[in-house]
Amino acid sequence: MTPRLTEFTLGGILTLVLATLRDPRGTGRQILSMQLPVPVLWLLLVTIAVWTALLGQTAAVLLLPGDAAEGGFTIGPLGVAAMQVGGLLATVLAVHHLGRLMGGQGTLERSLLLMSWLEVVMLCVQIVQLAVLLVFSVLGAATPGLFVVVASFALMMWVFTAFVAEIHGFHNLWLVFLMIIVSVLAISFVLSLVLSMLGLTFTGGGFA
C-alpha cells in the first residue's frame, strides 16, 4: 500500500520507520511509488540533514567531555548543517551514478527520495541510540553502549544496501553490499589523495 502525505504524522512516520527496519526493500518500494515532486524531494533532503546535524551536536554535548564537545562547534551550527547537507547530497549522487555505472536502472529522483528517507530512519535510530547510551553512561557501563553503536551501524548498512538494490533493480544484496564497500574505499582513497596533493592533513580538530 502506497503511503499518502496525509499519513505523515508523527505516528505515521514511526510506523513507516518500523516497517522499514522489518522489511527495508518492501517499504522502500512503497515509498518510491509516492512519486513526489522534485522540489519536495530537495526540501525533504535539506530539512532532514539539518535535523540530523542538530541531533549530532546535541549528542556531542550530552555524551562527550566538555573540551571534546566544544571542539566540534568550532565551525558553528550552520557549518555543521551545511556539511550534513553536502554529505547527504554526495551520497545521493554517488548512489545514483555508481549504481548506473554498475548496470542499475535507477533515476536521480529515486535516489533522492530513498536516501532522504534513509536519513529519517537513521535520525529515529540515533534518537533511540542516544537515549540508551545516556542510560549506560549513567550506569557506568561502556561495553553495552559499544554493542548498541555497532548493532545500529549494522542495521543501517542493511537498510542502505536494500535501498540501493531497490533504487536500481538489483537482485543480489550481497553483491550490492560488496559494491558499497568497494565504492566507499575507492572514494576514501581518492579524497585522501586529493587532500595530500593539496597539502592538507586531517587531525583531531579538523584539517591542517
Image (cartoon, rainbow, N blue to C red):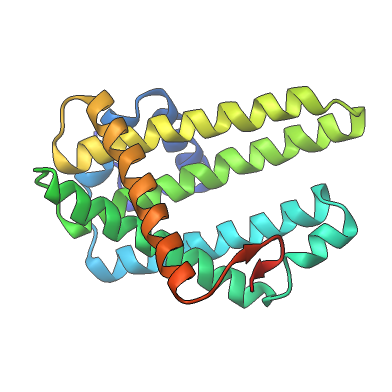
Q: Nearer the viewer, residue 108 or 143?
A: 143
Q: Nearer the viewer, residue 182 or 14?
A: 182
Residue at image point 48% right, 59% down: 48
Rendered-image quadrant of the C terminus: bottom right
Instruction: Give the image quarter of residue 53.
Output: bottom right
Q: Nearer the viewer, residue 148 or 204?
A: 204
Left or right of 126: which side holds 11?
left
Q: Is residue 101 above or below residue 192?
A: above
Residue at image point 28% right, 71% down: 39
Is residue 27 among the parts visible in the rendering?
no
Q: Is residue 22 above or below residue 20?
A: above
Left or right of 144: which side holds 129?
left
In percent of width and height, residue 162 lies at: 30, 32
Is residue 194 among the parts visible in the rendering?
yes
Q: Is residue 23 above or below residue 39?
A: above
Q: Is residue 171 above or below residue 95?
A: above
In percent of width and height, residue 131 lies at: 74, 38
In percent of width and height, residue 113 lies at: 30, 53
Left or right of 105: which side holds 154?
right
Q: Nearer the viewer, residue 159 or 41?
A: 159
What is the total number of numbered labels drawn onto the structure image? Answer: 0
Residue at image point 81% right, 28% down: 142
Residue at image point 69% right, 76% down: 76
Rendered-image quadrant of the N terminus: top left
